[in-house]
Amino acid sequence: VQLQASGGGLVQAGGSLRLSCVASGRTSSSYAMGWFRQAPGKEREFVRAISRTGGTTSSADSVKGRFTISRDDAKNTVYLAMNSLKPDDTAVYYCAAGVRPYVTAGPSTPEAYDYWGQGTLVTVSS
């Protein structure tokens, strides 16, 4: 499975962006999907995840109420809608796919994911 993330850019604090992650090589409906981010000098951290069926989602406390994850398996795409962006949200955002999240592993664990996209940079100015 190849994952291609897009939609990053420069936005002012309080603004919105929507990231997309398109899966190819195998249908996204086979996988739980997650978004992670990594800010300069920091470790990669969990943002949001969605189960294979879309029936369950998970969120980091830092983005709860501001970021929404959704999936459109007809388009093999998962989305991350980000609202009320803050400078602390500045990071490279990565999408990931795996069969273990929500099944045999927690969805916030990077090691549970088997495939990763290349990342898209989100910069939030104050």
Image (tube, rainbow, N blue to C red):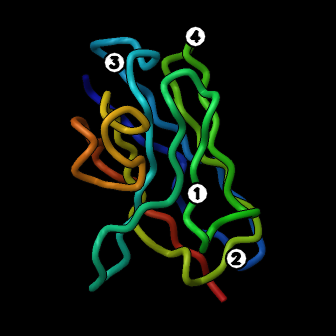
* Quadrant (top left/top right/bottom left/bottom right) for the C terminus: bottom right
Secondary structure beneath dot 3 equals strand
Mark 4 — residue? 74
Task: Look at discs 1 and 2 and give the one toward the viewer.
Answer: 1
Image depth: mark 4 or mark 2 in front:
4
Residue at the (24%, 36%) spot, across then down: 115
Q: Nearer the viewer, mark 3 or mark 2?
A: 3
Which label is found at residue 59?
1
Counting from the top left corner in percent of width and height, residue 90 is at: 50, 75
Q: In terms of sequence position, does the residue under pointer 3 or pointer 4 come before the other?
A: 3
Percent position of residue 84, x then y: 76, 70
- The answer to whether residue 58 is left or right of residue 104 is right
Q: Is residue 78 above or below residue 125?
A: above
Instruction: For the residues labelled 3 and 1, say whether their Cβ atoms are less than 8 Å apart.
Output: no
Indicate the quadrant where residue 13 lies: bottom right
Spatial separation of the CA atoms under disc 3 and disc 2? 32 Å
Q: Could you tell me how far apart the alpha carbons at marks 3 and 4 are, in whole angstroms?
A: 12 Å
Tell me how far mark 1 sits from mark 2, CA to CA. 23 Å
What amino acid is labelled 2 in the image?
A: Gln
Q: Quadrant of residue 93?
A: bottom left
At mark 1, the secondary structure is strand
Spatial separation of the CA atoms under disc 4 and disc 2: 32 Å
Label 2 CA crowd tier, 10 Å (few <14, some 14–19, many 20+)? some
Residue 24 is labelled as 3
Image point 42% across, 19% down: which residue? 28
Residue for badge 2: 12
Who comes first in sequence, dot 3 or dot 1?
A: 3
